[in-house]
Amino acid sequence: MFTVAAFYRFASLPDPDALRAPLRDLAAQQGVRGSILVAGEGVNGTIAGPPEGVAAVLSHIRLWPGCAGLDAKESRAEAMPFGRLKVRLKREIVTFGVPVDPDAPGAYVPPAEWNALIEAPDVAVIDTRNAYEVAMGSFPGAIDPGTASFGDFPAWWEANRERLAGKRIAMFCTGGIRCEKSTAYLRAQGVRDVHHLEGGILKYLEDVPESKSLWQGECFVFDERVTVGHGLRPGRATTCHACRRPLTEADRAHPRFEEGARCPHCADEYTDAQRARFRERHRQVKLARARGRAHLGPDAVAGD
């Protein structure tokens, strides 16, 4: 059984590049895989490995300036959900593209109080995630901005702010990090009553009993589990190995679905040569699996 930990922390890191290599080396030594982004504004990651290995990595990060209060949302996975370890230096730990002060976000709403907030008639609920994530599940009545990336959100807000004028705003995302920036952005734009789900959907699914939950569907996660449900149990979705979008059972039953090569969402997006490469890659993956091997080496480590 593997521990999966999702975490982020906004903190001023004067020399993030100097922090990257020691973190990467420790994680590799501890058998930890996943993705960690390090920037001058903080750290953001999802990792998996032996419980003691994950604990060692989190303890190491908590020694960084301003990171003592790093909180991680942990779950369990029977199989390793990552193929490799990536520790990368970035300009932002979540790309927004517009300067905001993450130390001035909207009001945090604990999962236990979230239902009452979003059911209030004067509240507009906004799902800040990308469209392919929203398609897997959301809260009833939540506004889907239809964005392809988080950096599209400011433009969407500018185009829609008038119709939401006078409303209290409640925002949510997977683990909370996108709401740190999006709610801070709305406050900087003059929106006074802004709230967001503390700990994100993952904390809500962990804390709120299914019998009392308003969540509908599953929650997309950025690892090989693809989605999780209540209690953070692995969901039923899979991934298109061509475009990496999550797939429902209906997607896999669609006539344009071809395992390893295309899905209904990307059937018109690639050339014949690209499709041929996808099919060959899928063939190699199946051959490796039949031989009891992983297609990606277990010791693969990416530093940039």
Image (tube, rainbow, N blue to C red):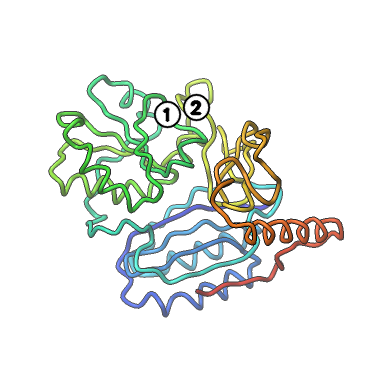
Instruction: Please name whichever residue, 91 or 157, is drawn nearer the observer in this view of the structure.
Output: 157
Q: Residue at the spot x=52%, y=35% of the render?
A: 136
Residue 82 image point, x, y percent = 63, 58
The image shows residue 252, relative to residue 276, as above or below, that is above
Residue 19, above or below 170 = below
Question: Left or right: where does residue 43 sit relative to residue 228?
Answer: left
Q: From what the image shows, is residue 33 above or below residue 213? A: below
- Residue 7 position, x and y percent, is 46, 54
Q: Which residue is mark 2?
A: 216
Residue shown at 71% from the left, 46% from the top = 259
Marks counted in the figure total: 2
Q: Nearer the viewer, residue 233 or 275?
A: 275
Quarter of the rendering containing residue 85? bottom right
From what the image shows, is residue 110 above or below residue 242?
Answer: above
Name the mark on residue 193: none
- 250 or 212, nearer to the observer: 250
From the viewer's side, name the closer residue of 109 and 263: 263
Q: Amino acid at mark 1?
A: Phe
Tell me whether circle 2 and circle 1 mark residues in contact (CB < 8 Å): yes
Mark 1 residue crowding within 10 angstroms, few (<14) / some (14–19) / many (20+): some
Real-space Cα separation, disc 2 to disc 1, in angstroms: 6 Å
Q: Residue at x 63, y 65 (%)?
A: 84
Q: In the rendered view, does 215 fall on the left or right side of 163? A: right
Rendering quarter of residue 89: bottom left
In the rendered structure, which disc, 2 or 1, sits on the residue that comes first in sequence?
1
Task: Name the kind of residue labelled 2 in the image.
Answer: Gln
Callout 1: SS: loop
The image shows residue 37 at horizontal and vertical percentages of: 45, 65
- The residue identified by callout 1 is 139
